[in-house]
Amino acid sequence: MCMILGLTGGIATGKSTVTGMLRERGIPVIDADQIAREVVEPGKPAYEAIVRHFGREILLEDGQIDRKKLGEVVFSDETERQKLNAIVHPEVRRVMREEAEAAEAGGADIVFMDIPLLFESKLQHMVEKIAVVYAPADMQLARMIERDELEEEQAQKRLRAQFPIDQKKSEADFLIDNSASREETVKQVEQMLAVIRAELKS
């Protein structure tokens, strides 16, 4: 019996910190962002479909997709953005399911799918339970300004592009509050794993 959980949060809530803690404890974490980069590499079906639709002018000289150029196209035209998502998202979901099955076949009883936009993309159906990494919105803002060297207005804009963290918090099966010390976060991760293991046994 294997439980598949979603791991999500907001920008700068510290999700990668929690991912690291899970991996240190031998828990497989499947990274949606990493897979999204892999499925658009030359030779992959999604790559071919993107080039067919958007044309060769979005390619770099070495044949890789020029993310900046493609980004300019899709962020200024909602229809084009939806077209890109319709090409990339099904491939990402397919690979994530394959990786989860492989982890289960390898003996994993707990698998996390790290999906930053889990709620925004309505992917709750892919997982049995959801863990949300939380930090208050003002802390997210301060961390982003410091980490990404952004102006406050730029940081606010990125925050507004996601569901508010308190909305995600209200839909969590497990909440990991990452606003205090690393030790506190570790404690919450271990408590969550203990609860999951107890459920798997019952």
Image (tube, rainbow, N blue to C red):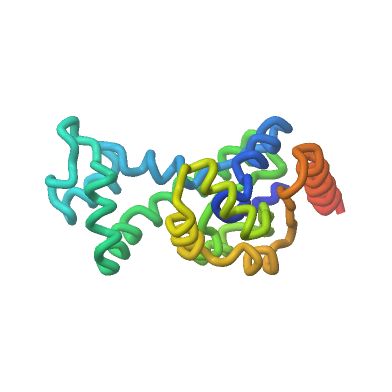
44 vs 26: above or below: below
Q: Which x, y percent locates residue 77? A: 25, 66
Residue at 18% x, 46% y: name it: 58
Between 153 and 128, which is closer to the camera in this rendering? 153
Quarter of the rendering occupied by the C terminus? bottom right
Between 164 and 150, which is closer to the camera in this rendering? 150
Residue at 63% x, 34% y: name it: 106
Examine the rendering and report whether any part of residue 136 can be seen: yes
Q: Which x, y percent locates residue 90? A: 40, 56
- How many marks on residues? 0
Q: Quadrant of residue 17?
A: top right
Residue at 29% x, 68% y: name it: 78
112 vs 22: above or below: below
Q: Which x, y percent locates residue 128? A: 66, 59
173 vs 65: above or below: below
Between 8 and 163, which is closer to the camera in this rendering? 163
On the picture, is 1 further left or further right than 48? right
Residue at 54% x, 43% y: name it: 146
Between 61 and 99, which is closer to the camera in this rendering? 61
On the picture, is 190 further left or further right than 125? right
Examine the rendering and report whether any part of residue 121 can be seen: no
Q: Which x, y percent locates residue 33? A: 46, 45
